[in-house]
Amino acid sequence: MVKSNLTTSTLRIAPVGNSVSLFLLISYLLCIGFGLLAPEQIAMHEAWAPLLPGFEWLTWTGFLIGLVESYLYGWYFAILFVPLYRWFAKVR
């Protein structure tokens, strides 16, 4: 029987951090783009505001803060998730 690659090797924080960070960054950019194209009633910027302190709609400062915070949230996820995954993988 062939084991899954995830079960035979451990996750590393750096690849997970970069992957999740880029995923969140791309999602942020897509939502900003959608917000620029969509009518105000269905825009996504109101969903980002509580999650990204300092984010303001249609300002350069708010946009850049959103980019940085989206990327940092990915690292936050990786720093917590990878050690938890490793611990639970050993426990089983």
Image (tube, helix red, strand yellow):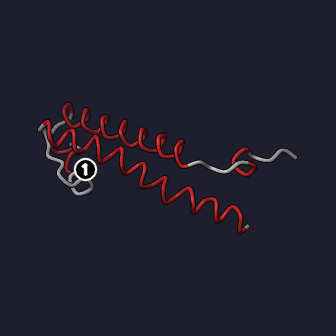
Residue at the spot 54% in from the left edge and 41% down from the top edge: 15
Q: Secondary structure at mark 1?
A: helix
Would you name the residue on which mark 1 appears? 48
The front one of 28 and 36 is: 28
Give the answer, above or below, for where 6 lies relative to 27.
below
Structural crowding at the residue carrying mark 1, measured as other residues with C-alpha within 10 Å and reported as few (<14), some (14–19) or many (≥20): some
Q: Quadrant of the C terminus?
A: bottom right
Residue at the spot 14% in from the left edge and 43% down from the top edge: 57
**Residue 45 coordinates in the image, percent (x, y):** 21, 45
Horizontally, is 86 left or right of 54 in the view? right
Question: In the picture, residue 88 is in which quadrant?
Answer: bottom right
**Residue 40 coordinates in the image, percent (x, y):** 14, 41
Horizontally, is 43 left or right of 59 in the view? right
Three-letter amino acid code of the residue under disc 1? Trp
**Residue 81 coordinates in the image, percent (x, y):** 52, 58
Residue farthest along the bottom direction in this orientation: 91
The front one of 80 and 35 is: 80
Question: In the picture, residue 61 is in which quadrant?
Answer: top left
**Residue 20 coordinates in the image, percent (x, y):** 46, 44
Residue at the spot 62% in from the left edge and 49% down from the top edge: 11
Horizontally, is 45 left or right of 77 in the view? left
Residue farthest along the right direction in this orientation: 1
